[in-house]
Every structure is written in C-alpha cells, then in structure tokens.
Amino acid sequence: MHVTTIRDSLFDVTHQFMTRNYFTDAVELNQLVKKKRAHSANLRTDIPPIPFTGNPWNKENGNCMLFIGINPRYQSSDNVKSHHEFGPAIESIERFHNGDDSGFNDYLNQRKNYFLQEGMKYGKHFTFPEKKLREHMYPVENPWDRHIQSLDCIPWFSVDAKTFDHEEVCNAYNNSEMFLSYRRIIEEIVKLIRPNMVQLNGGLTRKVFESSYSKNSFSPMKEMNPKKGIHVGWCEIGGHEIPTLSHNFSGYPNAPNGNKDWDEMIANWKKWIN
C-alpha cells in the first residue's frame, strides 16, 4: 500500500537521520554504549535503524499516545536480505544512499504501513499491549492506526539488550550526534500528534527519558509490586509536558505481565493522572 506523506518538519528530520551511514554508526555505538566487560553492545550493523513504527501522520491529534520500547529486536534466523521486513528496508535505503530519493519514500511507506501488513508485527511485544490498550483506552479494531505511535529508545536492531550499559546510553543520548539526530524525530512526532500520554516499556527506556526529558526522577507506583518497576512522572518533549507511565520490559520476569498486572497498573495510572 502506498501512503502519501506530507513534507513537513518530521519528514525532513527523518530524511536527515536516514542519510546517516548506519554501518559506521552501529560500529561506533557498539563500543560507546557497551558494558565494560562486554566485547560489544551487539547492535546490528547490517540493518538500517527504524525511525518509528506505524504512521505518525495518521494519528488523532490529542487522542493518542507514544509506546516506546528499548530497541527493535532482531528475532529472525533468516538471511537479512531475504527477510520480509529487513530485505526491503536494506534495498530501499541502499538506493537512497546511492542518490535515488524514491528509496527513502519506499522505506518510509514500509514503516508507516507496518501495522497494516499481515505477518509484520510479531508476538507478545505488540499483541498483548494492543489487547490491553484497546480494552482500557482505545476501543477500536487497530489502535496502532490512529491512536498508538510505536517508537524505540534506541532505533538500531539487536538480539537483546543485555550488553547495554545504562549510564553510557544516557550519556550518549545527550551528547552523541547519532542519538541527537534521532531525538529530533521523537520531538517532531510529539509536536505533530500531541500525545496525551507516554508509555515507556523497559527500565533502560525510563532511565534515558528521565535523563533527557524529565526535570525530576519518576515516582514508583506505590500500589504495585515494586519488583515490576512501575513508575509515573512527566516528560517534556518538543515543548510539550506529557504524563508518563513506565515499567520493566513487559513479557520478561519482574515486569507487569498478564491481565491482572495490566488491569491494576492502568487503573492506578488513571487515578494518578486525574
């Protein structure tokens, strides 16, 4: 499906970010943000980073949210160039870097159409949050279309996030040009869609957003098991102050998992913002 994109500030900063040499960026970051005893942060050097997932230009202004994970997971054993998501992305960005701007437009459509294509979104990472957010907040068939904008804290792929040094990621987020370039995308999305909440999925994500976008540390949600890492606070992004819910990465141990955890977490969240 082809979707026409308005050439606005978000388009421009996304275009600028995707001009970067993602191989050399990932090589540099693998040393910059790795744990001290790790050989590498294990970011993939052969797959372009993702600026966003889903179509921000289609969101219902003021009646939507940001759902922000740690980083996109490389969950396939396929050769990347034959993979149904990575292959077209690599081919499109390669054309773009060779001077064919239609490659960028094709890649942008791949990201915008992600939740409209069968076989793209995978497993519990999107399926369970979709179920609960539809149940409690956006009672529509596909809440990703108009109401939930998916992003990642770190836009480069990896198998897992085990070798990231949290403090080094926070430092890089505020000082490294590759992250500063990506942050311009986050900020332009906020200006465009005016989300009424942010949900941060992962302890690292909370630490980064506290460091970069919050004047104060978030407060634990006292009604919930502290091992779940559930916090509330405020982020100021793109000149907009937004109430923010954060928790340990859903689906992993010591995180809000299952209907009971999410029902209680969202009920307490609604009490907090009111």
Image (cartoon, helix red, strand yellow):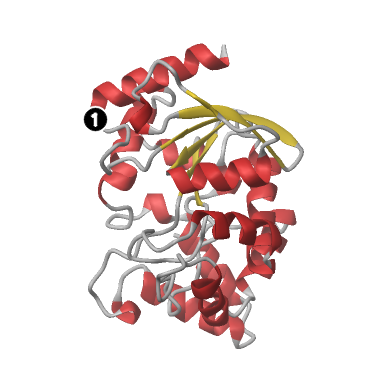
Compared to residue 197, the image places residue 152 above or below, namely: below
Q: Nearer the viewer, residue 35 or 1?
A: 35
Count the marks: how many?
Answer: 1
Q: Is any part of residue 207 visible from this angle?
A: yes
Q: Please state the horizontal and vertical placement of residue 59, each as a whole percent of the image.
A: 56, 39
Q: Please state the horizontal and vertical placement of residue 210, each as a whole percent of the image.
A: 61, 40
Q: Secondary structure at mark 1?
A: helix
Q: Quadrant of the N terminus?
A: bottom left
Residue 12 vs residue 100: left or right?
Answer: right
Q: Nearer the viewer, residue 253 or 56?
A: 253
Q: Please state the horizontal and vertical placement of residue 218, each as a whole percent of the image.
A: 57, 30
Q: Is any part of residue 150 visible from this angle?
A: no
**Image quarter for residue 223?**
top left
Could you classify mark 1 by the number of other residues whose Cα lies within 10 Å: few (under 14), some (14-19), or many (20 or more)? few
Residue 238 vs residue 231: left or right?
Answer: right
Q: Please state the horizontal and vertical placement of residue 68, each as a whole percent of the image.
A: 49, 45
Q: Amino acid at mark 1?
A: Gly
Q: Which residue is mark 1?
A: 258
Report the residue at 32% width, 47% height from top. 125
